[in-house]
């Protein structure tokens, strides 16, 4: 039995690995890569079988953010060429979300740029969530609106919101290197407030921002302490016009090791393959499905993903199945050929 077998046994039994074991996953060589993936697959299969959950992002307010998160194309002062628009109307949000549901998404994620919502903003979002849930009561809704004030999480929960996303992004020790307008503790408190309101906590990280292996392990362990139900793992897209432009630190092999480490530390969490997967994992995306059990379908907030039809084909070709209701054939949903970023007046995706 190898050290990876021992690590997988621990995870299957719900035991937290030692920090040294988590660091060893990140430090493992290419000759061990398939062994790392196989050990992580044992854990993934134990808790999630061969199911892949599909999630779909709706960018309900884009750009014009007063925060200075160095990785973000929507940050204050960003010169990145992204769409900028204020809050979408309820009917636009519902139509956008339904494009994802048509492709098999079992969770739609409503995301708004900004430090955090006003009470009027929360009213607006609650109205949209109630309208969507009246049409799709079995589809989960995750809100991602930034830092929450007192009582806002409770109002979102009362409107039918399933989950709240607020990523830790990196370790507490590295946080000041990627943002100066709010603190790591602010993010922790928002995840905690959402959880206390009965919302499913969703929190993850971004890799490739100049962090060390120790930072990655720190944030994985911090997430474990918060017990999120969902852990999105993003890989930095170094947008031109942001402070991290040109920062290409990741390889497909390193991305797989990061995903495996997160799986070992958070064995029964929904580990979601998120932004940057197409760019950084490239042809190894199907191998990542042996570690994660959840992906975003189509595009992200300000960057394009691969066509929704390609996502569905990749899942099937790798021998996995879509969780929940099986989507109808892709040709019946031409909007999934390539889901694009929507602004006001462009609620339905355009094909390319």
Image: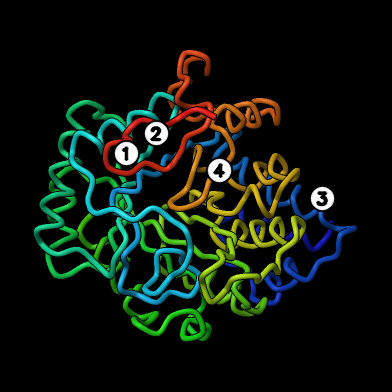
Whole-percent x, y for residue 202 in the image? 39, 56
The Cα atoms of the two marked residues, 3 and 1, are separated by 34 Å
Which residue: 33% across, 52% down?
A: 111
Mark 3 vs mark 4: which is more N-terminal? 3
Which label lies toward us, 2 or 3?
2
Query: In the displayed structure, does residue 78 sit left or right of residue 19?
Result: left
Residue 314 falls in image quadrant: top right
Residue designated by label 3:
34
Residue designated by label 1:
140
Which residue: 79% across, 63% down?
A: 3
Mark 3 vs mark 1: which is more N-terminal? 3
Whole-percent x, y for residue 276 in the image? 59, 54
Say which element carries label 2: loop
Mark 4 vs mark 1: which is more N-terminal? 1
Q: Residue 78 bears which disc, if any?
A: none
Say which element carries label 3: helix
Residue contact at pointers 3 and 4, CB within 8 angstroms: no
- The image quadrant where one finds the N terminus is bottom right
The Cα atoms of the two marked residues, 2 and 3, are separated by 30 Å
Residue designated by label 2:
106
Residue designated by label 4:
305
- The image quadrant where one finds the C terminus is top right
Whole-percent x, y for residue 185 in the image? 35, 80
The Cα atoms of the two marked residues, 4 and 2, are separated by 18 Å
Residue contact at pointers 1 and 2, CB within 8 angstroms: yes
Query: In the displayed structure, does residue 121 sit left or right of residue 283?
Result: left
């Amino acid at each position: 039995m190898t050290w990876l077998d021992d690590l997988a046994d621990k995870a299957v039994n719900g035991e937290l690995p030692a920090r040294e074991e988590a660091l060893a996953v990140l430090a493992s060589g290419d000759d061990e890569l398939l062994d790392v993936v196989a050990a992580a697959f044992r854990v993934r299969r134990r808790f999630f079988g061969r199911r892949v959950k599909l999630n779909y992002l709706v960018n309900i307010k884009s750009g014009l953010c007063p925060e200075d998160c160095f990785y973000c194309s929507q940050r204050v002062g960003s010169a990145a060429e992204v769409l900028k628009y204020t809050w979408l109307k309820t009917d636009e949000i519902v139509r956008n979300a339904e494009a994802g549901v048509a492709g098999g998404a079992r969770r739609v994620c409503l995301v708004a740029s900004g430090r955090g919502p006003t009470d009027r903003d929360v009213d607006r979002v609650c109205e949209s969530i109630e309208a969507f849930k009246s049409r799709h009561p079995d589809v989960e809704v995750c809100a991602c609106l930034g830092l929450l004030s007192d009582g806002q999480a409770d109002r979102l929960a009362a409107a039918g919101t399933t989950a709240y996303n607020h990523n830790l992004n990196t370790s507490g020790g590295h946080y000041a290197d990627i943002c100066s307008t709010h603190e790591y503790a602010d993010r922790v408190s928002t995840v905690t407030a959402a959880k206390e309101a009965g919302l499913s906590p969703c929190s993850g990280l971004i890799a490739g921002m100049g962090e060390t292996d120790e930072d990655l392990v720190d944030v994985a362990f911090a997430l474990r302490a918060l017990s999120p139900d969902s852990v999105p793992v993003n890989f930095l897209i170094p947008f031109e016009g942001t402070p991290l432009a040109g920062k290409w630190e990741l390889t497909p092999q390193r991305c797989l090791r990061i995903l495996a480490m997160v799986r070992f530390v958070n064995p029964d969490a929904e580990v979601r393959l998120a932004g940057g997967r197409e760019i950084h994992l490239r042809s190894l995306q199907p191998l990542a499905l042996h570690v994660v059990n959840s992906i975003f379908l189509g595009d992200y907030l300000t960057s394009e993903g691969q066509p929704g039809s390609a996502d569905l084909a990749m899942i099937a070709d790798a021998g996995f199945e879509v969780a929940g209701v099986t989507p109808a054939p892709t040709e019946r949903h031409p909007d999934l050929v390539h889901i694009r970023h929507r602004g006001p007046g462009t609620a339905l995706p355009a094909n390319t």
